[in-house]
Amino acid sequence: MIKLTEQRSSMLHGVLLMALFACAAFYIGGMGFVKALSLSPMIVGIILGMLYANSLRNNLPDTWVPGIQFCSKRVLRLGIILYGFRLTFQDVVAVGLPAIVVDAAIVATTIGVGLLVGRLLRMDRGIALLTSVGSAICGAAAILGTESAIRVKPYKTAVAVATVVIFGTLSMFFYPIAYRSGLLGLQPEAMGLFTGATVHEVAHVVGAGNAMGKAVADTAIIVKMIRVMMLVPVLFVIGYAVHRAAVSGAGDASRAKVQVPWFAVLFLVVIGFNSLGLLPGSVVGFINEFDTFLLTMAMAALGAETSIDKFRRAGAKPFVLALILYCWLVGAGYVMVSSLVPAMMG
């Protein structure tokens, strides 16, 4: 009994350490220059975790490690579930069929292209899948959800997050310049659709959209949230693929049983509940802030398990893949918006 109490206390130390990192990430994220880059506390959190992993990590008591792993697993899944409070089914209806079609096409083709290119580059399959899903859906949040489904090593998750952060940040500068210069020739609504369907992180979409005006930002954010919803069917497909690989002998035999991503189901349930509008806006706002804090804890925990040596082990291929996917998002996304929504074109 005493030993069990000591184990729980040690795990709590690891959890509190990640909570401290999350508090620091929120403080740093509130600074002017960080806000200007639209870097969310989640991204700051993983950076802090990685800095810690490559400096003071060796001084951490081994008994604290289970608490860090708890944050990267259990806390992460709770954060994904509560993410549903940012969405409603009314948002889907508001933007109509064109946005759904474009989003679905972008998600499916980007993941397909990413897996194909990853195979051609002979990349680690886990990193290739995480990078592809992160580029296709919603950056870090999608990577975290997929990581929970396929259970890869934390450093692979950190590498994938790094790729989407780099190219998502690039989009915040490139998209407004291209729009203001008339290079794309898109009306505000069409530009919002293009932005929401192709930019990586929700924070990056907000940053880029606001730089182009309210008309662009409003459409972009809703279209982006529809992409976030598509994480649910994607996780089911991934779970089924892992099951098939195990059955055929290509994967771990212990995974022969289908892994149902229940956190993804609950994520969808939360969206449905939020669509009813039963909670006051202030309560939903508080839940969203709390959810961001939980996801920041999870990101810091993943960063705390990631050293420079592991990045070196991954090599340059993940960033090459992310660059190819970025070019695909911009090029294919523009073609899709131009062809599927001609009435919205200038």
Image (spheres, helix red, strand yellow):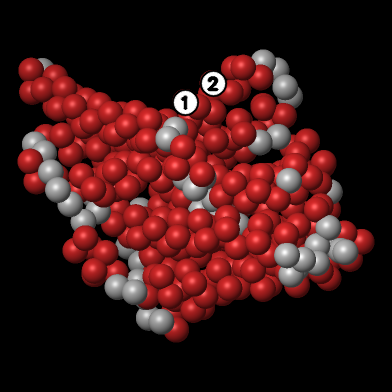
Residue 196 in view? yes
* Residue 201, above or below 316: above
Tell me if mark 1 has few (under 14), some (14-19) or many (20+) residues whose alpha carbon lies within 10 angstroms of its own.
Answer: some
The answer to which of 204 and 112 lies nearer the viewer is 204
- Quadrant occupied by the C terminus: bottom right
Is there a contact, CB below 8 Å, between mark 2 and mark 1?
A: yes
* Left or right: where 221 falls relative to 94: left
The answer to which of 182 and 13 lies nearer the viewer is 182
Q: Which residue is drawn at 80% across and 67% down?
A: 185
* Residue 175 coordinates in the image, percent (x, y): 64, 60
* Residue 61 coordinates in the image, percent (x, y): 8, 36
Mark 1: which amino acid?
Answer: Phe
How far apart, in angstroms, are the residues tagged by discs 2 and 1?
6 Å
Task: State the residue position of label 1.
Answer: 290
* Residue 287 coordinates in the image, percent (x, y): 53, 24
| Residue with the most extreme right position | 343
Location of residue 34 (image quadrant): top left
Mark 2: which amino acid?
Answer: Phe
Q: Residue at x 37, y 35 (%)?
A: 28
Task: State the residue position of label 2.
Answer: 286
Secondary element at image label 1: helix
Q: Residue at x 52, y 57 (%)?
A: 168
- Label number found at residue 178: none
Number of dots carrying numbers: 2
Tell me if mark 2 has few (under 14), some (14-19) or many (20+) residues whose alpha carbon lies within 10 angstroms of its own.
Answer: few
Location of residue 92 (image quadrant): top right
Secondary element at image label 2: helix
* Left or right: where 176 falls relative to 304: right
